[in-house]
Image (spheres, rainbow, N blue to C red):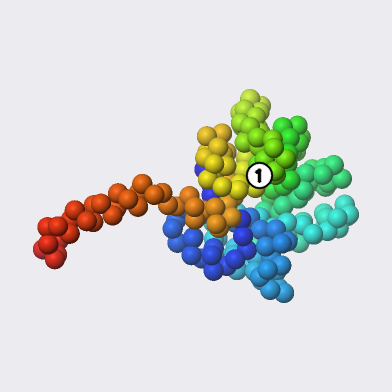
């Protein structure tokens, strides 16, 4: 399973990439707006930090012609860029053409099994169902991941399932159980998944017991 960071914070990306568990980054206009007035340079920097990882960059245009042109321009920033496009009916034709053009697409704002099926038929690289936003309206968003995984496997689609809008450890746990190909996590959620109180307690106990021996150096 691939693990992406959902951020454009270059310092955080550099820090966590050193752990060896980070496979890419998902950005959006909100993330990039926090990193200064040159978002293209920010994207270039991130792509260089993770040259073998997929870096998702979202369109900001809205009309069909401008979306198509911007998607090509974004894809040219670096070879590992994946263009994010919302799953809106106005963009279906454009997504279809971009896939035929060889542009890697991450379709975002996916909320149903049917939307996922349509995008898989078009052959996009990733679809990003938003788990947390379903939970916001008291619907179990994690169930959608199981449905999409089953559909992909049944029809042998090559599109990858990227679980997004994961708000906590429970969401990540569900995404792993569902067999998501990738997940994207905010920094705070990643940090929560990195520690466990029982791990910390165990380490404290081992250290306390070892110190009772009074050994200054091991091995000597």
Seen in the picture, residue 36 relative to 179 is either above or below; the reply is below
Q: Which residue is mark 1?
A: 132
Tell me which residue sits at (53%, 49%) in the image.
3
Residue 76 placement: quadrant: bottom right
Observer-nearest residue: 186 or 67?
A: 186
Residue 50 locus on image (x, y percent): 54, 60
Observer-nearest residue: 194 or 3?
A: 194
Residue density around tag 1, few if under 14, some if 14–19, many if 20 or more, within 10 Å: many
Seen in the picture, residue 64 relative to 136 is either above or below; the reply is below
Residue 177 locus on image (x, y percent): 52, 34
Observer-nearest residue: 200 or 157?
A: 200
Seen in the picture, residue 158 relative to 85 is either above or below; the reply is above
Q: Is residue 187 left or right of residue 128?
A: left
Q: Quadrant of the C terminus?
A: bottom left
Specify whether residue 156 is in view. no
Tell me which residue sits at (82%, 44%) in the image.
88
Specify whether residue 14 is in view. yes
Residue 77 placement: quadrant: bottom right
Tell me which residue sits at (54%, 52%) in the image.
189
Residue 90 locus on image (x, y percent): 87, 45
Seen in the picture, residue 93 relative to 178 is either above or below; the reply is below
Element class at badge 1: helix
Tell me which residue sits at (60%, 48%) in the image.
167
Q: Is residue 104 left or right of residue 182?
A: right
Residue extending farthest top:
154
Q: Is residue 134 left or right of residue 198?
A: right
Residue 38 locus on image (x, y percent): 71, 73
Count of numbered marks: 1
């Amino acid at each position: 399973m691939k693990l992406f960071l959902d951020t454009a914070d270059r310092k955080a990306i550099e820090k966590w990439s050193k752990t060896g568990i980070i496979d890419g980054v998902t950005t959006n206009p909100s993330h990039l707006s926090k990193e200064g007035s040159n978002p293209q340079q920010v994207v270039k920097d991130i792509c260089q930090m993770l040259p073998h990882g997929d870096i998702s960059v979202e369109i900001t245009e809205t009309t069909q012609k401008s979306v198509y042109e911007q998607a090509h321009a974004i894809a040219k920033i670096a070879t590992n860029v994946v263009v994010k496009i919302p799953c809106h009916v106005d963009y279906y034709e454009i997504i279809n053409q971009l896939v035929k053009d060889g542009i890697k697409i991450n379709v975002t704002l996916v909320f149903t099994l049917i939307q996922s099926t349509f995008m898989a038929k078009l052959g996009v690289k990733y679809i990003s169902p938003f788990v947390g936003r379903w939970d916001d309206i008291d619907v179990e968003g994690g169930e959608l991941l199981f449905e999409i995984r089953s559909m992909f496997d049944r029809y042998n689609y090559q599109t990858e399932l990227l679980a997004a809008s994961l708000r906590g450890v429970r969401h990540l746990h569900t995404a792993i159980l569902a067999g998501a190909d990738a997940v994207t996590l905010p920094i705070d959620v990643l940090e929560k998944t990195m520690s466990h109180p029982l791990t910390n307690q165990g380490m404290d106990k081992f250290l306390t017991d070892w110190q009772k021996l009074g050994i200054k150096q091991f091995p000597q």
